[in-house]
Image: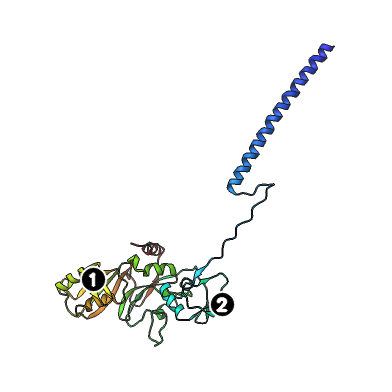
Amino acid sequence: MQKRGSDRFSHFNYRKGAAKKEQIRKDKREARKEREAFFQAKKKGTPVAGTRTPPLKREAPAQMPLNKYLAHAGVAARREAAEMVRAGVVQVNGKPINEPGYKVMPGDVVKFKGKPIKPTHDFVYILLNKPKDYITTLRDPQNRKTVMDIVRFATRERIFPVGRLDRNTTGVLLLTNDGDLAQALSHPSHEIKKVYHVQLNRPLERNHFDALLKGVVLEDGPATVDVLAYADLKDKTQIGVEIHSGKNRIVRRLFEHFGYDVKGLDRVVFAGLTKKNVDRGKWRFLSEKEIRDLKYFGKGK
């Protein structure tokens, strides 16, 4: 009986010890899994049960230079906006500000000529085939016609012209409220390509043709053209000019330097945009592809 009991109990004790060892191994596996899950969650920044989630770091309020704020609000390109600030027509929180680099904080109330303005992210891009006798400004104190009269019903957003074409110059003109793009397309360092069709009062002489390609010195410094060609070999009063300079009235002044009178000046290309299928005095919105291409042009050559 004792042997049987001994055999019986010895068998029981064996199973009991094996179960303990298996339970220990199971506990270790679970502990290892929990430890691995803990450190994985910690790496990802996921809150872990039983731990204190660290507070989020507060970012400093976004600041924006005042001239850039005006550009993003569709008032004007940054350089022109800086001139407006210096002219004393901008107020922040009821106080006139004359410094373009003044930092505008979230919650500040900015007014331009007495009217509140805010930056917009609803960007608008319009190509206008500018006609003669329109000036490239937002408004004119002499009540002359401006390009804004043509596009005044195009959008509710405040848009402005990028660059300028003088009153008697026709052709491609971009209008937008994208201040960053306007700044990029206007900055001389980006060397944005422009192509003009010029009509002179007399044929362009060969020596003057060569001199223009070499470059001339005007009252505000040296000036050159990138490409020069006769638009019509039978009519050498018709000239094609490719240029990247942003100097005021540069094309007219180049030919006037040699005594020519520019009878007609038409911009046919600006930053890759053309007036194809846009009649004189008409406008259209840019396509998505054209906008992407403009962003590329804005980054340089």
User: Is residue 63 positioned above or below 4 on the image?
Assistant: below
Q: Which residue is mark 1?
A: 240
Residue 126 at what x, y percent from top left?
40, 71
Query: Horizontal and vertical percent for residue 162?
Result: 38, 73
Q: Amino acid at mark 2?
A: Asn
Q: How many marks?
A: 2
Q: Is residue 261 above or below residue 190?
A: below
- Mark 1 vs mark 2, CA separation in Å: 51 Å
Residue at the spot 38% in from the left edge and 64% down from the top edge = 298
- Left or right: 45, with 88 as reference point: right
Say whether disc 1 or disc 2 marks the residue closer to the N-terminus: 2
Specify whether residue 178 is in view. Answer: no
Q: Position of residue 42 (x, y in %)?
A: 61, 46
Q: Quadrant of residue 2?
A: top right
State the residue position of label 2.
Answer: 93
The one of 152 and 74 positioned closer to us in this rendering: 74
The residue depicted at 36 percent of the width and 81 percent of the height is: 135
Q: Residue 296 versus residue 126: which sits nearer the camera?
A: 296
Mark 1 vs mark 2, foreground winner is 2
